[in-house]
């Protein structure tokens, strides 16, 4: 069975924030942008009380020079795999007994909510709360060996790629609750070569591959950063140059191997937590705020 559910209640919010990454800020000079007074480095900050993305995020080579098709609904919650299936044993979640059938808690009302206050004295942040419960047992579909995960994604040019080559890196505020027990915690940047087909992904995640000589057949090993060791219950400013984000090593390597060679093929940003194919019940509880490029 696969269960990804909203957890009722949240750890106390702590407004104090510390820097966790150790690279200097390199804010792009605003004077070069022909977009008036809009904040053109910002992707999302949730201060309007919604998960919407900033339509004035700068994109090199575009006319007008900003994103034009952010994903509808803004920053989205998703779970994998879907649908979620209750197996042979009844499951009780928040007093409700589920005996059988499929449950699809994959919409934003389930597990990702814009809540006050945000990081660094701001009005709002996006709070993600969920459970992952998989016995990794052959009696429960889809069986053992599955990487169950929940994630949020920010897709600047929906179903396409974003050209971030003007920028040096990405920063955001992150708060991980002490109740969060997911063994995998990753910030990731998928590109076309690491993302499975269909387009804009070009990694052939089929069995067997469509082309046995295709260089990218083991998918989903995105460029990223492991945030499992950050301090808990406080806002942390994460700042990462593109050059400091790396693949984990379980998938086909990108060609060339550095993210800096693929900045015009970025698909989206994602924060993913998973069970690493381990049996048991895991709690996911984290918040993000003020996502921007520099």
Image (tube, rainbow, N blue to C red):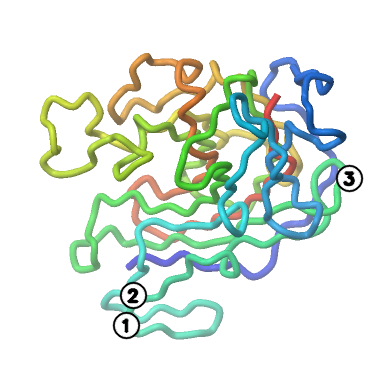
Q: Measuring 36% from the left and 81% from the top, which residue is drawn there? A: 90
Which secondary structure, mark 1? loop
- Point out the image quarter for the C terminus: top right
From this view, report whether residue 15 is shown above or below residue 22.
below
For marks 2 and 1, the one nearer the N-term is 2
Where is residue 118 shown, x and y percent of the image? 80, 50
Classify residue 89 by image quadrant.
bottom left
Q: How many marks?
A: 3
Q: Nearer the viewer, mark 3 or mark 1?
A: 3
Look at mark 1 in the image and give the residue it sits on.
100
In front: 154, or 227? 154
For marks 2 and 3, the one nearer the N-term is 2
Look at mark 2 in the image and give the residue it sits on.
86
In front: 181, or 106? 106
Mark 1 nearby-residue class (10 Å; few <14, some 14–19, many ≥20): some
**In the rendered view, does 283 fall on the left or right side of 18?**
left
Where is residue 225 shown, x and y percent of the image? 53, 29
- Point out the image quarter for the N terminus: bottom left
Question: Are the residues flagged by discs 2 and 3 in contact, CB closer than 8 Å?
Answer: no
Mark 3 nearby-residue class (10 Å; few <14, some 14–19, many ≥20): few
**In the rendered view, does 149 fall on the left or right side of 126?**
left
Q: Measuring 59% from the left and 33% from the top, which residue is drawn there? A: 229
Where is residue 176 shown, x and y percent of the image? 65, 46
Look at mark 3 in the image and give the residue it sits on.
121
- How far apart are the two marked residues, 3 and 1, measured between alpha carbons? 45 Å
Question: Are the residues flagged by discs 3 and 1 in contact, CB closer than 8 Å?
Answer: no
Which secondary structure, mark 3? helix
In front: 70, or 184? 70
Where is residue 40 shown, x and y percent of the image? 75, 33
Which secondary structure, mark 2? strand
From this view, report whether residue 234 is shown above or below residue 64.
below
């Amino acid at each position: 069975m696969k269960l990804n559910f909203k957890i009722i209640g949240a750890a106390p919010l702590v407004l104090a924030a510390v820097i966790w990454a150790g690279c200097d800020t390199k804010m792009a000079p605003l004077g070069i942008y022909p977009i008036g007074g809009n904040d053109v480095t910002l992707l999302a900050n949730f201060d309007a009380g919604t998960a919407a993305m900033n339509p004035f995020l700068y994109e090199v080579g575009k006319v007008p020079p900003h994103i034009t098709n952010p994903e509808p609904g803004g920053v989205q919650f998703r779970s994998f795999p879907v649908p979620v299936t209750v197996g042979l044993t009844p499951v009780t979640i928040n007093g409700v007994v589920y005996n059988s059938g499929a449950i699809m808690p994959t919409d934003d009302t389930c597990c990702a909510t814009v809540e006050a206050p945000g990081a660094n004295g701001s009005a709002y942040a996006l709070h993600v709360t969920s459970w992952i419960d998989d016995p990794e047992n052959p009696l429960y579909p889809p069986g053992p060996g599955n990487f169950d995960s929940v994630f949020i994604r920010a897709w600047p040019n929906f179903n396409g790629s974003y050209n971030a080559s003007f920028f040096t890196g990405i920063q955001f505020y992150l708060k991980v609750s002490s109740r969060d027990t997911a063994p995998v915690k990753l910030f990731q940047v998928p590109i076309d070569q690491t993302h499975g087909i269909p387009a804009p992904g070009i990694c052939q995640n089929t069995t067997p591959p469509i082309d046995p000589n295709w260089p990218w057949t083991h998918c989903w090993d995105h460029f990223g950063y492991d945030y499992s060791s950050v301090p808990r219950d406080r806002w942390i400013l994460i700042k990462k140059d593109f050059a400091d984000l790396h693949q984990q090593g379980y998938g086909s390597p990108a060609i060339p191997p550095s993210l800096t060679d693929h900045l015009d093929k970025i698909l989206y940003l994602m924060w993913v937590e998973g069970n690493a194919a381990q049996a048991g019940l895991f709690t996911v509880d984290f918040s993000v705020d003020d996502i921007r490029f520099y």
